[in-house]
């Protein structure tokens, strides 16, 4: 099924070369018969550290198990990603595939297998034929280049309608470093630790134990604040690789908070860029929805309330119908299980407050609300009137396109 | 918008007169302009007791507040229900409407206002014009009859495509009594305490404090085990009225467990009948889905796993597409947050096990699975392989019909 690009698609920014990384894509023919690229590899310089977060699913894919184990070494030399088959719920065969894939890549790079990281995305429950993957690797490895970013961003797509990338610079101790990231994701998006596949590279030199907390914190307010369909994937992965190929003053544990402040700012921007691109490419999405919750008892409560609204099929279908049905927002707030007082709750759309103090605002001007609902980006404001907790979450609308795509995904 | 009856619709059974209850419906013109009935009243004999469960929403409607307060008296003489306007998030005006409605009905019946129970269903956030309701009440009260069951079942419908009713008999101390119930509901169905509106009547004489635990237990395995769209309503209400109009041996607290065993059996059957009718009438539903979870660590965990599958848009759209996509079932089990071991999990559809021990069953026969998926009722079996906890939950598929209905509900 050919799918038109999402009307919310953004152009892929130019991702410049990043010292210490060479990457590319190849056609392995694992599942797709259209000749599209489906295998991506990146090779990083010796000394590359990493941080990662994975799905909280209790039924994770075999590559997740592999990466969790390999991470213990704290070093990375390569990452191999295939699209079309998620290698999830594939039993011993799935474990064998991860071993064979890592071994084949390690031989090409000249590193221990446990410095090769793996990710797979696509159909669940079908054995991933690793012979096709390992057969395609040598030629792919030969072709790796510092300019392979767009090829890599395209090679990891499944139901995605546009490739996703983001780049920023930051300074560490006065030296400029760069962060490049690519991601894929469109359906099965309700990240609990991370979402789908996202790979970020930087030429900074940051020890793994200092990189991990920055990533975890950044993911909490980006990927973990987005949802397309409330369905948490078995393959969610966000990885950051730091090649250290650009020389800058050494970062130590005690001066990390200050030295890495700008790095963390830039990384958070890349994470949010990519998370919102995934949401913009939500299956069937016609509108990007931002939900700002304020006045909750605390930030955790605010986020839960926001996600209850973001995951409500009734709210999402109303927005698809360009109907500012704030009654359904009230319903979703009410079902969140968080502290709420109907008579202190306020609801606004597109900057216009429509309801407060437990009732509609008499005679509020519907004109700007109606105009706002017709746009591609819909902003919802929810003030709980209880405390200072706040959160922002993002989702997309629920349309016929979602049903079309998911009623026939395997056929 | 005229909506064809659900393909899963069941005919309304004949609901015979029930001693102590007279009921009927009228056209109050509260919201609908089609001349359809939208106001229902039932009057019960003096001495009627009641039990009820309501939504756990933190933003409940004004009628819920009214009923929770009125219940403290333990006595009921009438119930008044309107369709088209839920009287939710209507502030002081909503409270005034409940007071005026109850007072008007109480005057006609000749009872205290707090023995009149109220329920409203329909749009949220619009003031319910109680003058239309109270103006229609006197003529409606005059018309009440022991044969008004079908009229009542039809009068409480909103987006429902068929009226819902169930009847059973049971014996108490050797005397036969009857239970009649009616319900409405189609969207915003993910009951947390109860779902939408359900009214059950019996001629048995059962004190309120003995009736309540039986109802609460029955709701836990019927209404609270169903979902259409994961959206818990602000108006969920299940009420049981016991008129005591049929004489049977007196039920006391100590002999209640034994004497009311058959009554509880019959009540549970009525509750499940009505809950499944609501699920069959799920907005856009083409298939009724039953999910049996076994082998979970306990019953609560089993239910949560079942509901995670039942609420998964990806599972529901796959079933709409007649695709036995068990990989999505694995995904939904994994996101439930409950104890799970991928390598001990088994998944079956229509009596055929497709996956076990962490992988697909090699060479399993797909033919009966494909045939089963084409039917109107789809059975999913999930064995967790961990313990003895089990639960059964029900839902419906997610189709274009759901988007059609909810993208234009207010227009």
Image: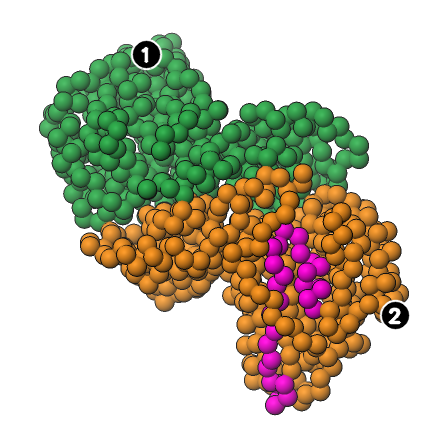
Chain colours: A orange, B green
Secondary structure of the residue carrying numbered label 2: loop
In-front residue for pair B297/B5: B5
Query: x, y percentage for residue B205?
Result: 29, 19
In the displayed structure, B126 sits above or below B157; it is below
- How far, Cα to Cα, is label 2 from label 1? 82 Å
Q: In the figure, is residue A336 to the left or right of B41?
A: right
Label 1: few (<14), some (14–19) or many (≥20) C-alpha neighbours in 10 Å:
some
In the displayed structure, B94 sits above or below B6; it is below
In the displayed structure, B276 sits above or below B306; it is above
- The residue lying at 47 percent from left, 57 percent from top is A288
- The residue lying at 51 percent from left, 58 percent from top is A8
For the question of whether residue B367 can be seen, the reply is yes
Query: x, y percentage for residue B156?
Result: 30, 28
Label 2: few (<14), some (14–19) or many (≥20) C-alpha neighbours in 10 Å:
few
Q: In the figure, is residue A33 to the left or right of A13?
A: right
In the displayed structure, B342 sits above or below B41; it is below
Q: Chain of mark 1?
A: B
Which of discs 2 and 1 lies nearer the camera? The answer is 2
Q: In the figure, is residue A353 to the left or right of A246?
A: left
Is residue A151 inside the magenta stretch?
A: yes
Q: Quadrant of the C terminus of chain A?
A: top right
Q: What range of the chain is rendered magenta?
A: A149-176
Res B165 → quadrant: top left
Q: Which residue is mark 2?
A: A110
The reply to whether callout 2 and callout 1 are in contact (CB within 8 Å) is no
Query: x, y percentage for residue A219?
Result: 57, 65
For the question of whether residue B309 can be seen, the reply is no
Is residue A18 inside the magenta stretch?
A: no
Query: x, y percentage for residue B168?
Result: 40, 15
Secondary structure of the residue carrying numbered label 1: loop
Q: Chain of mark 2?
A: A
> Residue B16's mark?
1
């Amino acid at each position: 099924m050919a799918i038109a690009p999402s009307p919310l698609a953004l152009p892929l920014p130019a991702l410049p070369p990043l010292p210490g990384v060479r990457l590319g894509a190849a056609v392995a023919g694992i599942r797709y018969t259209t000749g599209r690229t489906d295998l991506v590899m990146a090779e990083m310089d010796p000394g590359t550290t990493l941080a990662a977060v994975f799905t909280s699913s209790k039924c994770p894919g075999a590559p997740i198990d592999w990466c969790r184990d390999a991470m213990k070494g704290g070093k990375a030399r390569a990452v191999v990603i295939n699209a079309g088959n998620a290698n999830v719920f594939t039993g011993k065969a799935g474990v064998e595939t991860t071993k064979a894939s890592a071994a084949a890549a390690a031989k090409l790079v000249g590193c221990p297998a446990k410095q090769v990281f793996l990710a797979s995305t696509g159909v669940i429950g079908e054995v991933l034929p690793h012979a096709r993957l390992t057969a395609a690797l040598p030629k792919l490895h030969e072709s790796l280049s510092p300019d392979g970013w767009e090829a890599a961003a395209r090679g990891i797509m499944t139901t995605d309608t546009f490739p996703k990338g983001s780049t920023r610079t930051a300074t560490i101790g006065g030296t400029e470093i760069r962060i490049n990231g690519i991601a894929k994701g469109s359906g099965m998006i309700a990240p609990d630790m991370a979402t789908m596949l996202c790979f970020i590279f930087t030429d900074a030199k940051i020890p793994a134990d200092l990189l991990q907390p920055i990533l975890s914190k950044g993911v909490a307010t980006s990927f973990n604040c987005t949802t397309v369909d409330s369905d948490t994937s078995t393959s969610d992965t966000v990885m950051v690789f730091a090649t250290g190929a650009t020389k800058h003053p050494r970062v130590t544990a005690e001066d990390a908070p200050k030295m890495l402040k700008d790095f963390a700012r830039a990384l958070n921007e890349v994470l949010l860029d990519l998370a919102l691109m995934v949401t913009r490419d939500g299956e069937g999405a016609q509108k990007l929805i931002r939900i700002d919750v304020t006045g909750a008892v605390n930030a955790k409560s605010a986020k839960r309330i926001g996600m209850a609204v973001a995951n409500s099929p009734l709210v999402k279908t109303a927005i698809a119908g360009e109907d500012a049905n704030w009654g359904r927002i009230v319903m979703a707030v009410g079902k969140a299980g968080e502290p709420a007082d109907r008579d202190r709750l306020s609801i606004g759309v597109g900057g216009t407050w429509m309801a407060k103090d437990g009732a509609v605002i008499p005679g509020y001007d519907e004109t700007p609300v109606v105009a706002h609902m017709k746009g591609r980006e819909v902003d919802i404001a929810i003030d709980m009137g209880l405390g200072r907790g706040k959160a922002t979450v993002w989702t997309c609308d629920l349309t016929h396109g979602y049903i079309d795509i998911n009623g026939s995904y395997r056929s």
